[in-house]
Amino acid sequence: MTNVRSAVLVVLALTACGPAEIRIDETKGVPSVKGDTEITISATFTCGEAIPAGDKMVATRVVTGGCEFTFDDTLQVLSASDYEVIGDLKVTSNLVQRVELTIKKLAFVDGATGAALDINTRVTSVVLSVNGQKVADKAAITSLPAVVSLEGAALTALKAKVDARQPASVAVKAVAVLPDMPRPPERLKIDYEAQPALILGPGKIF
């Protein structure tokens, strides 16, 4: 009877554990999502004008507290080759359960000197979004790194690509308000980095 009871307890314990999740992050080859954009603010610049930044444009508009700058970018999370290189991604029965982002950097820099702007005096507000979800703001910058989980539409867009083992990218947007005084540096650069972690588990695509 004792042996039977022990066997039952073992079965119940294994059942309670459920299927194991697999975490795929930088330790398994997932690259960080990082980028930087630099713009030149000329002496004749008037807030409300769009500013060229390579093959993109940075929109600006007058708001309370200064001038708002909107930086948009699309950054790759996984390439086609990553699905062959990262072993855990080869198991097609493992689908994305959630995606975590560790925000490592969100900084504004004087492109001429390389010095970071004082977030308290040179930046009125800032919001960093990934796939439309807010992942960091001015308060968060002072205590990085910070971990957030993608949810809703932000998760669905990325999940669909990974579950289908297709190249996956995310839309990154930084909206910052800089005060009129002191005037922003002539060469203004925004620098950001986030490390994704994909948590996979068994399932099937319906």
Image (cartoon, rainbow, N blue to C red):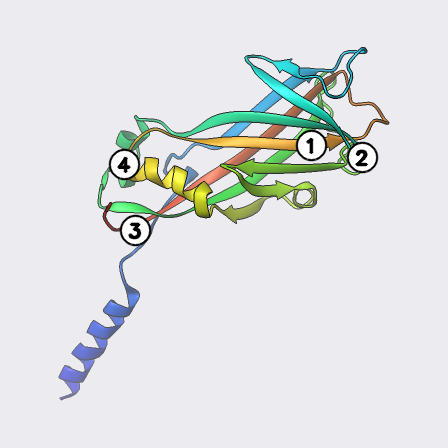
Give percent across and percent down for residue 145: 59, 44
Numbered label attached to residue 176:
1
**Earlier along the polypeptide chain: callout 3 or callout 1?**
1
Q: CA distance from mark 1 to mark 2?
A: 11 Å
Dot 3 crowding, Cα within 10 Å, few <14, some 14–19, many 20+: some
Q: Secondary structure at mark 3?
A: strand
In the rendered view, tell whether residue 55 sits above or below residue 119. Answer: above
Q: CA distance from mark 3 to mark 1?
A: 37 Å
Name which residue type carries label 1: Ala
Give percent across and percent down for residue 28: 36, 38
Location of mark 3 (residue): 201
Name the residue located 69 percent from the left edge and 41 percent from the top edge.
138
Q: Are marks 3 and 1 in contact (CB under 8 Å)?
A: no
Name which residue type carries label 3: Gly
Query: Which quarter shows the N terminus?
Result: bottom left
**Earlier along the polypeptide chain: callout 3 or callout 4?**
4
Q: Secondary structure at mark 2?
A: loop
Q: CA distance from mark 3 to mark 4?
A: 14 Å
- Quadrant location of residue 169? top left
Judge by depth and name the residue closer to the eye, 115 or 91: 91
Location of mark 2 (residue): 65
Q: In front: mark 4 or mark 2?
A: 2
Q: CA distance from mark 3 to mark 2?
A: 46 Å
**Earlier along the polypeptide chain: callout 1 or callout 2?**
2
